[in-house]
Amino acid sequence: MAQKHQPAAGSTCPGCDEPLEPADRFCGACGYDLSAVPAVSPDRPTVAIGTRVEWPAATGTDTVGTPTPTQRAADVPGTDSDGGELTLPDAAPGVPPQPSHAPTVGVSGGGNQRPAGEPGAASGQAGGPVRAAGAPPAGGPAGHAGSGHGSFSGPGAGPGFAPDHGHERPAAEGPPVPAAGPAAGASAVPAAGAQPQGATGREDHERAGDGVSPAAAAGPGPVPGGGQPPASGMRFDNPPSGDFELAAPVPGAPDPRAAAAQPAPPPAPQAAAKVCVACRAGRVDDDGYCENCGHAQPRERDHMEQELGSVAAVSDRGLRHHRNEDSFAVSSTALPDGSPAVVAVVCDGVSSATRPDEASAAAASAANERLLAALPRGTHPQQAMHEAIVAASEAVNCLAEQPASSEGDDPHRHQNAPACTIVGAVAAGELLVVGWVGDSRAYWVPDDRSGPPARLTEDDSWAAQMVAAGLMNEAEAYADERAHAITGWLGADAYELEPHTAAFKPDRSGVVVVCTDGLWNYAEGAQDMARAIPADAAERPLHSAQMLVGHALDGGGHDNVTVAVLPFTVPEQGAGSA
């Protein structure tokens, strides 16, 4: 039956520290139930803290009686702590080879040991204890153990004690084993299986010359399973099986260390992160949106500008369309007589057709390349313009035979042929040539504004046909919802290709405005275009093109806007007569 806890004399209440009597079951001050207080355990630690523990002496062998293997510094080629060479000397006949520094007799805690064979080194004595050469015999004065100078021998070197840094500690038990007599000219070597006198069975801090283990003292012997004994004092319980041997290097193979030593190539420089054009703070991700404000960033074709000498062009997506389906090309070349020829081509993709952006880009590029190839050969500019429009039509027709490259195109959706319009102008000498198909236009605006501006092209559209037939006036025709329905275009589904070309010889200098309907919808008449273009357009063509695009955007920007400004210079009368 368990007994209830009784408070000890002189104890206090755990709740309020009130003194208690041995017979109290409850605290008189706070009512604490003293029976709930556990009794103090009578157990005590087995070993008191601070009590010195006597550890058993080391035996020099493992649990199965095998001598502990020891590898000494002299087993590895090099130098010892004294700077001496660790080489194997010539051994006498019948004596197995040993390291050049034979084990010294005794252990010196802090001094430098002399190898056997040198003055002051130990030499073996047959049938008697081993002592240092030149030292007094056993029983005479011995070196000071632990003093750090000389070898230790004599009575103090017997079994039972081995000096180590001036402290005595137990040594391996057993009587001394007489060493074999030294051979002529050879260092004294302990007998096989003998343990040097004064050597301990367990060395806590072993150094070269501090003694040898029984395995090392036994010297090399036969290895189980045959083969040559190891050069060191290591003991092999099993013969080498070759499972972990390294394969010999293949002759002529590259050294893997040389490849590893080669410096790694420097990392490729990272492209600078794009900054949002709206907030000017957020970074643009791979999808083209700002990570800060979420604004969609303009694509490459959303706004394009190019200036080449005296000709410039600007194209913009506008404010209502999701992509820019217009394209342009500007270039210059030389005629056979060396005079310059400047080219400007503008194309407008048909929105109701498939891949209109690809059609406009292909047409502008093909027409420009054909003009640059024909004009230097001496082809008449008007004929070259006709050939350029035909080449542009063929390039657009080829797109109908190619699969759609846009990721958003549905392969099961009905697709018509890509289509676009085109207008181009060439300033070659005193001749100004224009060519077109569709409703893209070219305007002439003189520099001094003294002469009237003019529209140089006629639209291939429903409104133009109504006006030409006299069924409507121009105002009524372009007010109709069918006004911009084109009757001519470049594409595989065009009824009949009829390139329009015209040649002019202006009598004064001015500029040619080559544009799509995204601009002329906000400056339809020639006078409207003359008012929209800056007065210094001939001197600043790029700035003038930018101003015209801005004029369309300010008017609403319902369509893509593309305009090229091509200055045309007429030499003054008598300027070169002098």
Image (spheres, rainbow, N blue to C red):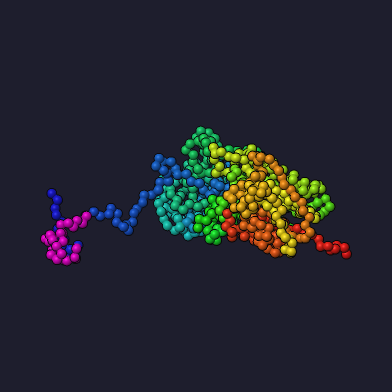
Residue sticking out furthest to the top: 225
User: Does residue 17 lie above or below 174 as drawn?
Assistant: below
Residue at x 72% of width, y 49% of height: 435
Q: Which residues are magenta?
A: 15-42
Residue 232 in the image: state x and y as whole percent. Answer: 53, 44
Residue at x 45% of width, y 44% of height: 68
Q: Look at the image and tell me whether residue 532 can be seen.
A: yes
The answer to which of 372 and 424 lies nearer the viewer is 424
User: Does residue 562 lie above or below 9 as drawn?
Assistant: above
The answer to which of 405 and 201 lies nearer the viewer is 405
Residue 11 in the image: state x and y as whole percent. Answer: 17, 63
Q: Main secondary structure of the magenta part?
A: loop
Residue sticking out furthest to the right: 578
Residue 83 in the image: state x and y as whole percent. Answer: 58, 54
Residue at x 54% of width, y 59% of height: 278
Q: Along the horizontal axis of the image, is 296 left or right of 544?
A: left
Q: Along the horizontal axis of the image, is 58 left or right of 390?
A: left
Q: Along the horizontal axis of the image, is 314 left or right of 283?
A: right
Report the quarter where the C terminus lies: bottom right
Residue at x 71% of width, y 45% of height: 499
Q: Along the horizontal axis of the image, is 224 left or right of 186?
A: left
| Label total for image | 0
Q: Look at the image and tell me whether residue 360 can be seen.
A: no
User: Does the segment drawn in magenta span residue 11?
Assistant: no
The answer to which of 54 and 349 lies nearer the viewer is 349
The answer to which of 334 and 469 lies nearer the viewer is 469
Residue 574 in the image: state x and y as whole percent. Answer: 85, 63
Residue sticking out furthest to the left: 23
User: Does the segment drawn in magenta span residue 18?
Assistant: yes
